[in-house]
Image (cartoon, helix red, strand yellow):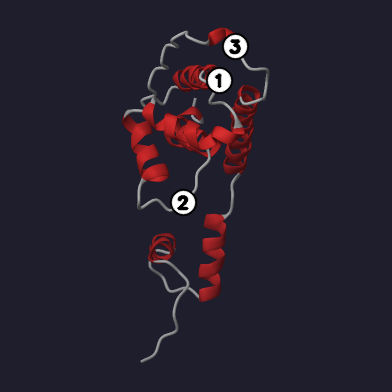
Amino acid sequence: AGSEPSSESSSDEAWYKALTDGKKTSKRAKRKLVAKLRAKTEDDERRDSWLNRVHQDYRNQMSEQFRPGPPNEGLKGIKLPLPEKYDGSKDVEVFDNWFMAFLRWLKLSHLSSPERDGECLAALGTYLEGDALCWYNNEVKSVHRTKRQWTFEEAILGIFDCCVQATTLHQ
């Protein structure tokens, strides 16, 4: 008996059964039910809007720090203190303080230019620990990662999304 391949996932089938109490329904009714389940809600739209604004704020901070300026000759020979490591804390203030300190350190270390994005990305990994480092290693550096090329900006936003964003929405 040949059956036609289904584009529906097994989780879709589980949803059908749960929502229809196991009663038989037409394929059209199932498709409508899945469409309703997958439709964006007002909360989703609010979250997406909020997240886009937050991402833009972080992008603006990075572009300000990476803006070309005159060479800073006054810092030669001064040993800069290293920034703290970010551990993946869910507290947005902890992330913001670490982020701003790390950007200042990149700027004072003369790494904050678009041409040095790869070096910024590599330096980022050395100033992470805990959940943040785990995300960085799995998503940015792992041989099994799904995205092959990352920018510093994408990695920063990815760390925010992984570590901070989910809990921030509920506060």
**How far across and how far down the image is residue 165, in percent?**
49, 32
SS under mark 2: loop
Which amino acid does the dot numbered 3 rest on? Answer: Glu
**How far across and how far down the image is residue 33, in percent?**
53, 63
Q: Considering depth in this image, is 150 or 129 the residue closer to the camera? A: 150
In the picture of the structure, the residue carrying the numbered disc 2 is: 148
How much space separates mark 3 and mark 1, taking CA atoms? 13 Å
How much space separates mark 1 and mark 2, taking CA atoms? 26 Å
Sequence order check, earlier mark of 1 and 2: 1
How much space separates mark 3 and mark 2, taking CA atoms? 37 Å
Sequence order check, earlier mark of 3 and 2: 3
Q: Which mark is residue 73?
A: 3
Residue positioned most to the bottom:
1
Position of residue 132 relative to residue 30, above or below, is above
Proximity of marks 1 and 2: CB atoms separated by less than 8 Å: no
Badge 2 local density, few (<14 within 10 Å), some, or many (20+)?
A: few
Q: Which residue is drawn at 42% across and 66% down?
A: 9
Left or right: residue 2 compared with residue 56: left
Q: Which residue is drawn at 36% across and 92% down?
A: 1
Proximity of marks 3 and 1: CB atoms separated by less than 8 Å: no
In the picture of the structure, the residue carrying the numbered disc 1 is: 107
Q: Which residue is drawn at 49% across and 31% down?
A: 120
